[in-house]
């Protein structure tokens, strides 16, 4: 598991990298809205962040005193660093099909797939309830399936098969085939886990 110091260092590197780029071109590629040279508005799950330039300082628009987790800051900054202009293709792939993802597969399962099964595998009604708070779009697959546009160009699909007395629950998380253009395999695993745990928190609300 990364330490908080690792995240702080990753943030410093990302900010330095982004500061050297054409920020207006960066905003345009990302799909986020913003004011050139001033700020970027970043919807992330059920929160909206203002990212003030040039230092990339994060503020929760709904609650300026609220903490913006550094893991989320790093993930958003890494997304902004992408030079790709590709749009999502609509072709879904498994996590292992993201280039280089094989090394992180066990972490992805532990961070995202197992919690999805353990939390919602016997209660798909709960994930259906939570998904609407994250603007999830129902997908016609499994016993419960939803598409989430977490970043403008990085959609996710969560699929659950509910367990019963005969079969254990099962789950899958799919990515658009362009996901590797925007996130590293490690970041993709973190993103999937963040969605699952945010759904879990919302199910208790």
Image: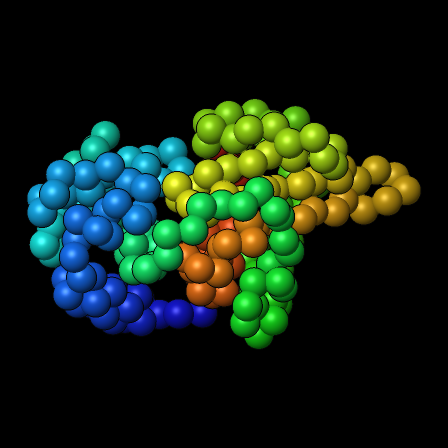
Provide residue 36's location: percent of width, then percent of height.
12, 43
Q: Colour scheme in the image?
A: rainbow
Residue most extreme to the right? 166
Please tell me which residue is depicted at 83% across the width and 37% down the height of the picture.
164
Please tell me which residue is depicted at 67% across the width and 41% down the height of the picture.
159
Q: Residue 148 vs residue 31: left or right? A: right
| Residue placed most toward the observer, 195 or 183 | 183
Provide residue 191's location: percent of width, then percent of height.
46, 52
Q: Is residue 194 visible?
A: no
Q: Look at the picture and state if 155 lies above or below 18.
A: above
Q: Is residue 189 visible?
A: yes
Q: Residue 86 vs residue 123: left or right? A: left
Provide residue 21's location: percent of width, then percent of height.
18, 61
| Residue placed most toward the observer, 183 or 161 | 183
Quadrant (top left, top right, bottom left, bottom right) of the N terminus = bottom left
| Residue placed most toward the observer, 35 or 61 | 35
């Amino acid at each position: 598991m990364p330490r908080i110091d690792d995240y702080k260092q990753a943030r410093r590197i990302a900010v330095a990298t982004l500061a050297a780029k054409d920020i207006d071109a960066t905003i345009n590629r990302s799909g986020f809205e913003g004011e050139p040279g001033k700020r970027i508005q970043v919807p992330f799950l059920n929160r909206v962040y203002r990212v003030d330039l040039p230092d990339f300082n994060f503020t929760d628009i709904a609650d300026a005193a609220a903490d913006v987790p550094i893991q989320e800051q790093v993930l958003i900054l890494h997304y902004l660093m992408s030079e790709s202009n590709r749009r999502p293709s609509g072709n879904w792939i498994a996590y292992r099909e993201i280039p280089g993802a094989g090394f992180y597969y066990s972490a992805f399962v532990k961070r995202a797939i197992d919690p999805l099964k353990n939390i919602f595998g016997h209660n798909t009604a709960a994930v259906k309830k939570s998904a609407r708070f994250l603007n999830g779009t129902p997908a016609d697959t499994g016993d419960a399936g939803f598409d989430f546009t977490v970043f403008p160009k990085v959609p996710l699909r969560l699929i659950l098969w509910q367990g019963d007395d005969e079969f254990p629950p099962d789950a899958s998380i799919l990515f658009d085939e362009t996901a590797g253009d925007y996130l590293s395999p490690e970041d993709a695993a973190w993103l999937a886990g963040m969605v699952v745990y945010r759904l879990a928190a919302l199910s208790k609300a």
